[in-house]
Amino acid sequence: MNIDKYPSKLLENAVNEFSKLPGIGRKSALRLVLHLLRQNTEEVNAFGNSLIELRNEIKHCKICHNISDTEICSICSNKARNESVICVVENIRDVMSVENTQQFNGLYHVLGGIISPMDGIGPADLEIDSLVKRIESGEIIEVILALSTTMEGDTTNFYIYRKLRNLNIKLSTLARGVSIGDELEYTDEITLGRSLTNRVPYESSVGQ
């Protein structure tokens, strides 16, 4: 039961909305809202408008499904990138993590999640079929499976491996410099960079 007493219904509504954000409790939400109230009107309007514009205008790249301002993202449209190698990741945060290593110059494929029966997420909910079609219609020579080293990540890796193993491409995965159970976005850049550089054939990672 909410026993907080607010002097304003407008304030309470704002706190309620902020507290819906991940990791934000009601006390943190109140602190954020009060901070905004101390800012001038122009700054608060700019803050609110940036969120509205983000939600209404953001796109997903037609090729890799990364978040983009345009139909084709800046990575896929960059002719300086190695178009023969695709790094498969779970989400936009993982793209940013890999890019920050400055050790990868290929393209990406964002799945939009990983297989997790407990959360009701199956292969059909992810961008796996589009990955297969992308490889079948292109000149890809290597696919790097760069998913988190969790049970769900390994399950997704194995599912993709079975879908791609007969397509005459090299399938590799991150070297285990990324600890078992780690999520990619929380891995430091040096470790992640080395794991990319020292990647191994996927078959080796499952003992085949």
Image: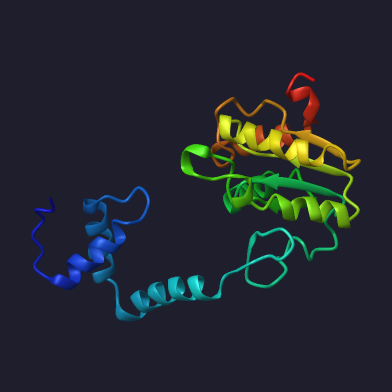
Q: Residue at x 79, y 23 (%)?
A: 204
Residue 147 occupies which quadrant of the picture?
top right
Q: Residue at x 77, y 36 (%)?
A: 162
Q: Where in the figure is residue 66, as x and y percent of width and height?
A: 65, 59
Farthest residue toward the top? 207
Quadrant of the rendering where the C terminus is positioned: top right
- As drawn, 106 above or below 46: above
Q: How is the image coloured?
A: rainbow
- In the picture, measured across the screen, residue 91 lies left or right of residue 23, that is right
Farthest residue toward the bottom? 42
Q: Residue at x 35, y 47 (%)?
A: 23
Q: Where in the figure is residue 201, as x and y percent of width and height?
A: 81, 29
Residue 155 occupies which quadrant of the picture?
top right
Q: Where in the figure is residue 42, as x and y percent of width and height?
A: 35, 81
- In the picture, measured across the screen, residue 53 lies left or right of residue 37, that is right
Q: Which residue is more in the foreground, 174 or 195?
A: 174
- In the picture, measured across the screen, residue 63 lies left or right of residue 2, that is right
- As drawn, 21 above or below 33: above
Residue 177 occupies which quadrant of the picture?
top right
Q: Where in the figure is residue 137, as x and y percent of width and height?
A: 87, 57
Q: Residue at x 70, y 33 (%)?
A: 158
Count of marks overlaid on the render: 0
